[in-house]
Image: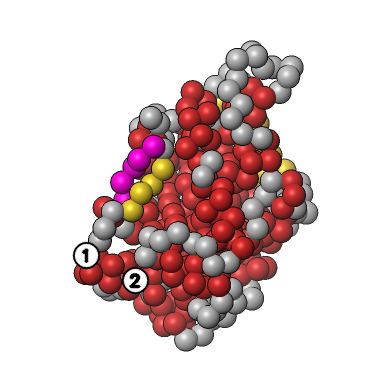
Amino acid sequence: MGEEDLETLTMIRVAGEFVTYVLFPGIDETAFAERIDWRHRDSASLDAIISPWRKDRYRIAIGTAVPDLILSRLQAVNIEGETAAQAERLGGIEPAMTLTWFAGVAFFATHEACHAAAGHVAYQKALNPETSTGDLPRPLDLATFRLLSELEADGAAAASLLSADYELMRTIEGLSSDGDDRADSAMMFIVIGVFATLELLASEGPVEDGYPTPETRYLNVVAAVFRHVAPHLLLLKSGDYVRREASGEEVQNVADRFRHSVLPALAALNHFDVTTPFGEDIAALLGGAVPNKSEAGRGLTRYSRNRARFMRALNRFRETRMWDDFND
């Protein structure tokens, strides 16, 4: 086995261990992640196979090409201006981009783990005529179920990683954790890794098969970032988030954090222009409003109308208590 192959397998193994022993224990008390058997599989594409295994356990096999494909996309990131300045606050471009790379691989692994934790895998198994008990609620067609599953896994994985930003930072050699700006700087590089991986994920599955477009996935993750940055501005009602009225100071605080993290991340990936309808929807989400200017924003709003039914259907299939607050 060559040195590059060893580095790839090490990255996959470390990402699985991070999800199991660092990420999930911080957000879930059921020890669910310890029931995941992490493996790798030879593959030339960005893929993973997740399946039930041994009673209440799951096996996730991540393709060996995943770390290299994410790294290749990150090599095209624009390291200049705001991106370069933020990198210096973290100790330099090399450790900052290593954080981005690991965040991308960890996001990919966490996305797969969230499919299991959220009950997506168990629900799909129950849909199989050979294993169904016949009493399964079917409130959604399969394409809508797949699409909402991808969006939920994206949002949960992104929010989980952002909640573990300091743990992520501690995994990177040479990364500085000193200075008042380190939180927003780390957020920016984590978000770059997440967005780059989302772009690759979206390119792997055609939209007609139930996979969201890259722009829809970006907007969905921006909404997840909003929930992470300003959880006190959100209430739960009928299985979905409802934004409460915010003070001018609260709005300004959220705007500042987005301006120094999410917006530079999109710009670094050549995916942000404030004058476009997509840019207007980013701004709408920043303010807690409904995105409706771009096709991606209108799509996300349309999909969200099915979210409460989706979560109720998955209620008895959830593997953890992470989603308890959503259940009516």
| Amino acid on which the number 1 mark rests in the picture | Ser
Q: Write the residue at 64% across / 22% down.
A: 126
Residue on which the image places disc 2: 255
Measured Cα–Cα span from mark 1 to mark 2:
12 Å
Q: Are marks 1 and 2 in contact (CB under 8 Å)?
A: no
Q: Label for residue 247?
A: 1
- Label 1: element kind: loop
* In front of the other: 50 or 4: 50
Report the side of 113 relative to 39 (left or right): left
Q: Which residues are magenta?
A: 234-238
* Quarter location, residue 59: top right
x 47%, y 53%: residue: 158
Magenta-drawn stretch, dominant element (helix, strand or loop) = strand
Q: Is residue 252 left or right of residue 299?
A: left
The 10 Å Cα crowd at callout 2, few under 14, some 14 to 19, many 20 or more, is some
**In the image, is residue 92 part of the stretch drawn in magenta?**
no
242 or 215, nearer to the observer: 242
The tag earlier along the polypeptide, 1 or 2, is 1
Q: Check the image and report above or below for 246 versus 62.
A: below
Horizontal relation, residue 74 to residue 245: left or right: right
